[in-house]
Structures are given as structure tokens and as C-alpha cells.
Amino acid sequence: MKKNIVFTLIAFLLVCSNSLFSQKKGFYENVQKKNVGKVLDDLNLYASKADFKNYFKLYAEESTFIGTDANEVWNKKEFMDYSKPHFEKGKAWNFTSLKRNITFSADGKYAWFDELLDTQMKLCRGSGVLEKIGTQWKIKQYVLSMTVPNDVSNEIIKIKTPIEDVIISGLKK
């Protein structure tokens, strides 16, 4: 009889601790989603205010920005050099997140995101990876893509073909 009570008590404690662990993990993930979301919101805010210094503080030292043009693949310094004249005009770009998804690596050190953005180019997609460095989330890779509705993709392909055929040919060499 005592064995049954002890066994039942141990089973009960295991179930409770597992439930508490799951709740704690879910709470932690929600907090981290808010933290990552804030980094991405701040990125958009600092660009709209042309705050060059704070905008680039959000990027890790070893990071990559991939733009909408096939030739736009820059490390942080190259992206800073490209962006500086835009920021110096007093307004870089103005993106607003419309829908965002964030997921985390099992160890919680990396976050992947994708989001639809309202931009001067209409709908774009931002996606990338953040790394938790110390207590701060830093952007390791950011990819900006223009969306192309399927209904007009053939027209867009016709427009971009002569330009991108040259790029494709150069990359094949």
C-alpha cells in the first residue's frame, strides 16, 4: 500500500514538474519573441528616422544584408557604406511590418523570422536570422525581397529578362 502511494506521489510530481517546465518554456519563448520583434520594429523605426548609428547597432559585427537586386549582397561595412548617403538625406526607408513569424533554434541562441512589409516598393518580404549575443539579439542576416503576384509574374519576367540574362551569363562563367 505504501509503495502505491509513493509511486502515485512520484508520478504526480513528475507530471506537475513537466507541466510547469512547459509553461516556463512557453513563457520564455513568448518573451524572446517580443525581444526579437522589438529589434525588428526598431530596425524599421531607425531607418524611418534616418538614425544611422542605432540602425547599425542592431546588426552583429559579422552580418550580411541581401537586397532586392541580385548584386546586393553586403557585409555590415559594405551595407553601411551603401546606406550612409540615404541616411544622410534625413530619411532612409520606411517599412512597416504587417505580418511576422518568428521561430527559435532548440538552444534558444538563434531566431529565424519572415515578415510581410508595407514599403515604398509595395509589399516586400523581410527574412533573416538573429543571434543572441550576450543578452542582446543581433541581426546576422537580413534578406529583403520584393513580392511578385503570380497573376503578373509573366509580365515581370519579360521586363527583367534582358537585365538578368546578363547577370546569369556572368555568373555561369
Image (cartoon, rainbow, N blue to C red):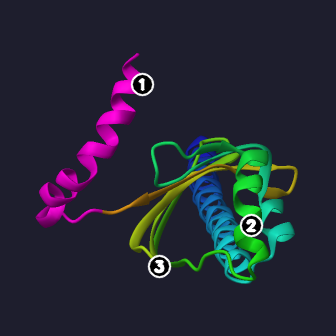
Main SS category, magenta section: helix
The magenta segment: 148-173
Mark 1, Cα crowd under 10 Å, few <14 / some 14-19 / many 20+, is few
116, above or below 73, in the image? below
Frontmost residue, 42 versus 66: 66
Q: Earlier in the sequence, mark 1 or mark 3?
A: 3
For residue 21, what is the image quadrant? Answer: bottom right
- Residue behind mark 3: 120
Q: Which mark is residue 85?
A: 2
141 to the left or right of 124: right
Measured as percent of width and height from the top left, residue 100 is found at: 48, 69
Q: Where is the C terminus found, in terms of image quarters?
A: top left
Three-letter amino acid code at the position of disc 3: Gln
Mark 3, Cα crowd under 10 Å, few <14 / some 14-19 / many 20+, is: few
| Residue 7 lies in quadrant | top right
Amino acid type of the residue tagged 2 in the rendering = Pro
Q: Is residue 50 visible?
A: yes
Q: Is residue 113 visible?
A: no
Tag 1 residue: 171
Q: What residue is shown at x 79% (from left), y 74% (from top)?
A: 88
Q: What numbered label is drawn on residue 52?
A: none
Alpha-carbon span between mark 2 and mark 1: 29 Å
Can you give x and y, in whole percent of width and height, for residue 59 in the image?
Answer: 76, 55
The question of residue 95 being in magenta is answered with no
Q: Is residue 132 above or below residue 16?
A: above
Where is residue 91 shown, x and y percent of the image? 69, 81
